[in-house]
Image (cartoon, helix red, strand yellow):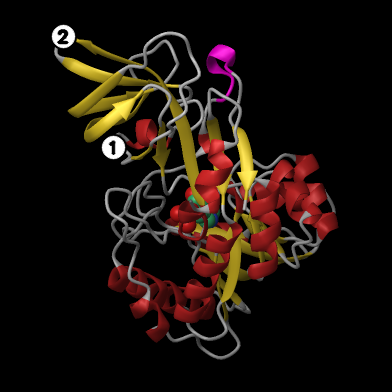
Amino acid sequence: MTDHTDLLHRLPTPRCAYLYDTRTLHQRATTLRAALPTGTTLLYAMKANGHPDVVRTLATLCDGVEVASGGELRLALQAGARRIAFGGPAKTDTELAAAITAGAQLNVESPHELRRLAALGYRGDICLRINRTTTAPAGSHTMTGTPTPFGIDETQLPTVLADLPDGLRVTGFHLHAVSNNLDGPAHAAFLTEAITWAQQTARTYALNLHVVNAGGGLGVDYLTDTSIDLTPLSSVHIPDNLELILEPGRYLTADAGTYATEVLDLKTTHGRTFAVLRGGTHHFRLPAAWGYSHPFTVLPIDDWPHPYPRLEITDTHIDAVGELCTPRDVLTRNQHVTRLRTGDLLLFARAGAYGWDISHHDFLRHDPPTFLTL
Ligand SMILES: Cc1ncc(COP(=O)(O)O)c(C=O)c1O
């Protein structure tokens, strides 16, 4: 029995847990570091998973942490992050002031935010987040080359630079473009193009460029066990005197999380069979948010302490559904099971990124899962 299953067996019933494995965080961070061009700065995008154990582990393994709120900033400071970058389109004055006090690198998303920073008394370097005119590499959540609330439209850059408040110096560009890109060569090309564009733009506007932050976006394929091929990234050339920053979240944390939840009921209605779970999309919203079926494995639990008969199905395709009163509470559709019984657990691997953190926990007020860290 692995230590995973041992821990799960020991949970109180009905069993429901998120299990985070810090050893996997080590593996992913090590693999990524080895694949990146020498000298790349690696920040962990905390929005993928803000569990304190995860943040603490990655704050140590990475050069720092990227945060997008005052809450994330506090967690990063508690985790002892050596370096913090603060982004996001809706920063409050309180958050900006806290980020200034913390000495965070500021990724500024609008001309209005520049004026607010200056009014707060900030003087110093900033990175401008730019929504480029060119399209992003393929992936989900395209954030550049298309209308979004993120960053400054590239065509507005001349005006923004001409009206830059006194004391603020643009020394970097933030160019996060896409989530879950599975195409390694395309991501390498995106990084190279981001560097080239930033250098040309800095020359055009006589900016003293130090930083190109290319954001996150390194993908994992939820339908297989593969991830983006990192090999092409090593060939990206970082010019002298320029820092390339990457801030991945998903690549580092997806594999480190398993969502495990007990089958409470099994039923067939109108010819379709459902495994009803002690859990669901209020714990793990990603499949519903992205509209795909998240694969699971079955962990048989042989214990059956109840006086009533145990339900069992064999050789059946099932929908794995949650405990919410909505037909959209579906984690997986139409996956085959050889055998499944009430009381068995479904294990959803690759649930460590944008799992619990993006879910609507309080809908229907069910108890939260247990959180276990290895
Ligand atoms: C600004 C920024 N940086 C980094 C990330 C992390 O992206 P990913 O988890 O796809 O690597 C995101 C995700 O949305 C983001 O918005």
- Left or right position of 12 against 148: right
Residue placed at 76% from the left, 56% from the top? 79
Dot 1 falls on a residue whose secondary structure is loop
Q: Which mark is residue 270?
A: 2
Q: Which residues are magenta?
A: 361-366
Q: Residues within 10 Å of mark 1 (few under 14, many from 20)?
A: some
| Residue 181: image location, x then y, percent | 34, 59
Q: Which residue was labeled with disc 1?
A: 292
Mark 1 vs ligand 1: CB under 8 Å? no
Position of residue 183 measured from the top left corner of the image (x, y, whole percent):
28, 65
Q: Is residue 115 above or below residue 44?
A: above
Residue 259: assigned label? none
Q: How far across and how far down the image is residue 115, in percent?
A: 71, 49
Precedes in sequence: disc 2 or disc 1: 2
Instruction: Tell me residue 78's x, y (percent).
Output: 80, 53
Residue type beneath disc 1: Tyr
Type of the residue with mark 2: His
Name the residue nearer the viewer: 130 or 51.
Answer: 51
Point 33% across, 15% down: residue:
327
Indicate the secondary structure of the residue bearing disc 2: loop
Left or right, 105 with reference to 32: right
